Amino acid sequence: MHYELLYWPEIQGRGEFVRLALEDAGADYSDLAREPGGMKQMQAVLQAHQGFAPPLLRAGKLVLAQTATILHWLAPRLGLAPASENVRAQLNQAQLTLADWIVEVHDTHHPIASSLYYEDQRAEALRRSELFRKERLPKFLGYFEATAHTSGRIHYVDLSLFQMIEGLRYAFPRAMKRLERRHPKLVAARDRVARRPRLRAYLESERRLPFNQQGIFRHYPELDA
Amino acid sequence: MHYELLYWPEIQGRGEFVRLALEDAGADYSDLAREPGGMKQMQAVLQAHQGFAPPLLRAGKLVLAQTATILHWLAPRLGLAPASENVRAQLNQAQLTLADWIVEVHDTHHPIASSLYYEDQRAEALRRSELFRKERLPKFLGYFEATAHTSGRIHYVDLSLFQMIEGLRYAFPRAMKRLERRHPKLVAARDRVARRPRLRAYLESERRLPFNQQGIFRHYPELDA
């Protein structure tokens, strides 16, 4: 089956969690908004299907929005989740915890509104980031350390967790350097994903956009003090 | 099958979205943390199953966390979602959009950290709430107006949307009074749910906790100015 991913062409953002699954599985997919005229097509699909926001996945007649929904549906078809409904529910639970974490990372630099520039909410961002580094980051890392998956089959949640660690290393290098020492299983789980041949080839390709200051993970040194 | 809901006993919170499904379906369930000694048991289950946070659902040997995961798994068993995987994925998409909305409602009064009192983030809350009322609330209401479900079978998402409207009316009565006029389908969908006999009986019972100032939906008049 051919899949179409629809996501903003200039950032990794939430689309990257879907892209990693497609790439790791060697799926037949296109990245619509990165093709000529693709942005217009993406906007038309969003309107027609009343999607709230990208990413969207198109698979035949089915159009889905919401990263975790897309991955829950897609992963068994890509060999990145088993068929068992109960195991899939456990994976979905982990993915939604990760989704909560992503919102909190985003809100470190945009605690007031996505529609305002960072510079217009910098004071609030400093305050929120300090508590994020002290309270929330250790809590999420601790949860995923306790549930880290260092052997057995790789699932899509492992790929998303890899992306999370990469993003946090970019955004909060100081805090992560300090905290990673206490989360060796999580780092091992990240390293195991990084060794996957198809994933490594993708990460080294031009298809992998670099982290930048428009995405979810942004590096403002003052937020990582 | 007997279900156990595990959630904080003093607030509606996220647990209420699961409770509404169980109540509307007339399911055989217990509300563990509201029974004597239940809080200790809930903490033990959280620890043993490495849940990140309540609500949790226990069904035989299965323990699930994350509201949307619980509902996705539970709803077909309660007659509140069809068996079709693609329809369930569409419902999950809507439920996750609703979950995003809930986070934004919570963050109107806690934009900096859940661990701080409202009074210690009141200035930031004023700023965030103003933009929430002007930009985000109309966007979410518009999305659910366009997709509102005013006929056909009731699904769990309809029950969650009912709860969302109830909560918003409690938290932002002024903004909602103004905005509801422009969202008649959404109000009709809410009213259709409110007429369900089992749900109405539940809402009038002592099992329905009142909204209060510890939950997700809080009424601070200054945030609804």
Image: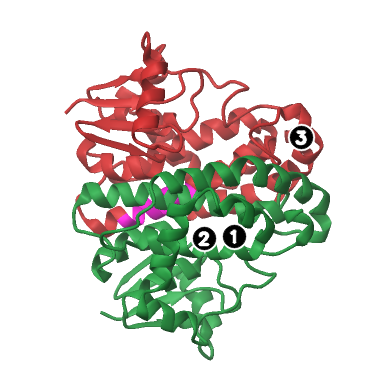
Chain colours: A green, B red
Q: Nearer the viewer, residue A74 or A149?
A: A149
Range shown magenta: B89-98
Residue depicted at 52% across the width and 18% down the height: B210
As displayed, is residue A149 above or below residue B45?
below
Q: Is residue A44 visible?
A: yes
Residue depicted at 52% across the width and 31% down the height: B166
Can you give x and y, in whole percent of width and height, for residue A8 in the image? 56, 74
As displayed, is residue B206 above or below residue A1?
above
Classify mark 3: helix, strand or loop: helix
Can you give x and y, in whole percent of width and height, for residue B181 in the image? 60, 42
What subunit carries mark 3? B
Query: Which image quadrant for residue B180?
Result: top right
Rendered image: mark on residue A164: 2
Q: Are marks 1 and 2 in contact (CB under 8 Å)?
A: yes
Q: Is residue B95 magenta?
A: yes
Residue position for label 3: B121
* 3D distance between C-alphas at marks 3 and 1: 26 Å
